[in-house]
């Protein structure tokens, strides 16, 4: 998964599990950037009677570095509150929900937004903002699109925010990827082939997720307040990530329900680039990685220079990746893509370099306009507005990172290396479906409802 259940400890704490992070120039409002942090992975739509929600004991943050030091100069904090309208019923709702403050919705969530500057000084931007309910079904949430739209809030400070359930935008053949990378389109070439190739199976097609989305004018993200109009300027590039934190002490009393949380907040989850903690960080370090800050990632550079997946592909697919098997040099391409951004001169007309500090940040050159003909393969597909220039909701990050790991991007920085022909073709065989997305903020589509989609089935 992009970052779903990626580490032993966070897999037990879904409300704090950062599953996907997106950063892109808004296609319909190109003077703004949209940042989306998803949490609470793999939600089966029929998840009652206690439907999914944000954690009221979790501090959610979206952080932006605009000067290349790997540390945030801008932080948006989101704190959630749950209010029971009727504590004497087991029901999530006692009738049709016609608004986000309808008394029929028993478990209402609201939230506050606070902005911190580089010194950590807070400014409260809004309180009491409403979330929509989960999409229960045609009787409980008969006009769900209206409920969702009513949860899009314009802040007096200039940002637009949304927090609530959405359709899962990340797509991947999870079953094949984690079954010894037996990718179905190339199954006949696998070391343990079962006898034939086939189409990929989208494991996340019928699940939902909880999204925190914020749309910010570019001028509020740049270090000098400019509008990010020069694609060659370092001031047009930001690095961003999301994190979730919990208080350091949890107190439970014998025969008393619930818990008290005490003390300062400490980070338990983070996410910049997709798939890093899944396939780059080894299992013995995953929990620790989630607690550290991106500015410290330089100590792990060897894991990026010699990724385990690149070593496994020639073994799992004999004679398919001979050049990759012989490649022993440190992978400078992956370091550039994932830890520093891509400098000028490597890809014509493009850079998203933030400097020498190595940090897992999703880097976005805000001066590159949204593509009129976007490719889900992003830069590999000739589309400079896509991943790894930030990440859009429909970008095929699983295939992009498979191909990069297989050596497709190494010739960019090591011209003497010839990538295997298979490197430009390898994929899990899954493509996005248009119903998962929408053209306007918050861009991820409406969540599936539990009545019509009772289980994760094709």
Image (tube, helix red, strand yellow):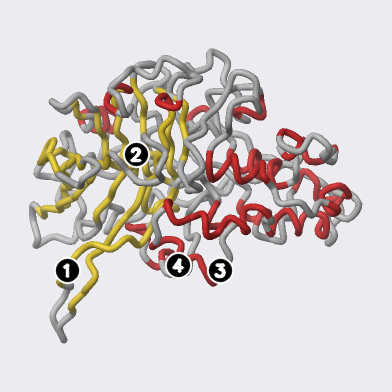
Distance of mark 2 from mark 3, alpha carbons? 28 Å
**Which of the pair 363/329 is nearer the observer?**
329
Q: Which quarter shows the C terminus? A: top right
To which residue does mark 1 refer? Answer: 263
Distance of mark 2 from mark 1, alpha carbons? 25 Å
In this view, 22 is above or below 232: below
Secondary structure found at label 4: helix
Q: Residue at x 84, y 41 (%)?
A: 420
**Which of the pair 216/231 is nearer the observer?**
231
Q: Residue at x 48, y 29 (%)?
A: 435
Distance of mark 1 from mark 4, alpha carbons? 21 Å
> If you read the primary sequence from the N terminus, does the residue marked by circle 2 or circle 3 appear first?
2
Number of labels in the image equals: 4
Q: Residue at x 14, y 44 (%)?
A: 122
In this view, 53 is above or below 254: above
To which residue does mark 4 refer? Answer: 287
What number is the disc on residue 64?
2
Label 4 neighbour load within 10 Å: few <14, some 14-19, many 20+: some
Front position among marks 2 and 3: 2
- Residue 411 falls in image quadrant: top right
To which residue does mark 3 refer? Answer: 283
Label 3 neighbour load within 10 Å: few <14, some 14-19, many 20+: some
Question: Does the CB distance between marks 3 and 4 fall below 8 Å?
Answer: no
Label 2 neighbour load within 10 Å: few <14, some 14-19, many 20+: many
Secondary structure found at label 2: strand
């Amino acid at each position: 998964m992009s970052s779903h259940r990626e580490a032993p400890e966070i897999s037990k704490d879904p409300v704090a599990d950062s599953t996907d992070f997106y950063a892109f120039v808004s296609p319909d409002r190109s003077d703004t950037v949209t940042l989306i942090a998803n949490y609470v992975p793999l939600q089966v739509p029929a998840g009652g009677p206690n439907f999914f929600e944000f954690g009221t004991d979790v501090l959610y943050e979206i952080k932006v570095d605009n000067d290349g030091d790997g540390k945030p100069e801008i932080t948006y904090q989101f704190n959630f509150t749950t209010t029971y309208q009727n504590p004497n019923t087991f029901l999530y709702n006692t009738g049709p929900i016609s608004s986000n403050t309808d008394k029929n919705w028993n478990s209402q969530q609201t939230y506050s937004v606070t902005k911190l500057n580089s010194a950590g000084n807070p400014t409260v931007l809004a309180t009491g903002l409403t979330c929509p309910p989960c999409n229960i079904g045609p009787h409980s949430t008969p006009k769900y699109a209206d409920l969702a739209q009513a949860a899009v809030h314009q802040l007096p400070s200039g940002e637009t925010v949304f927090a609530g359930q959405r359709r899962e935008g990340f797509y991947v053949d999870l079953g094949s990827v984690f079954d010894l990378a037996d990718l179905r389109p190339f199954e006949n070439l696998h070391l343990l082939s079962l006898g034939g190739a086939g189409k990929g199976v989208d494991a996340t097609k019928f699940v939902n997720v909880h999204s925190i989305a914020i749309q910010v004018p570019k001028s509020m993200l740049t270090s000098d307040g400019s509008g990010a109009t020069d694609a060659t300027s370092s001031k047009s590039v930001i690095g961003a990530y999301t994190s979730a934190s919990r208080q350091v002490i949890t107190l439970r009393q014998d025969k008393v329900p619930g818990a008290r949380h005490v003390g300062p907040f400490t980070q338990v989850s983070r996410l910049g680039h997709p798939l890093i903690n899944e396939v780059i960080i080894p299992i013995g370090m995953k929990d620790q990685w989630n607690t550290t800050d991106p500015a410290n990632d330089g100590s792990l550079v060897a894991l990026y220079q010699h990724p385990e997946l690149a070593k496994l592909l020639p073994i799992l697919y004999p004679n398919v990746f001979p050049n990759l098997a012989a490649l022993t040099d440190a992978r400078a391409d992956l370091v550039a893509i994932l830890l520093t951004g891509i400098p000028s001169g490597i890809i014509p007309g493009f850079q998203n370099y933030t400097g020498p500090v190595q940090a897992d940040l999703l880097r976005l050159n805000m001066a590159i306009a949204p593509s009129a003909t976007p490719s889900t393969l992003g830069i590999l597909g000739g589309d400079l507005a896509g991943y790894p220039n930030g990440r859009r909701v429909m970008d095929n990050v699983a295939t992009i990172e498979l191909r990069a790991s297989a050596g497709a991007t190494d010739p960019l920085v090591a011209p003497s290396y010839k990538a295997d022909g298979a490197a430009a073709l390898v994929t899990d065989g899954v493509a996005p479906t248009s119903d998962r997305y929408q053209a306007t903020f918050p861009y991820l589509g409406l969540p599936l409802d539990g009545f019509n989609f009772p289980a994760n089935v094709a």
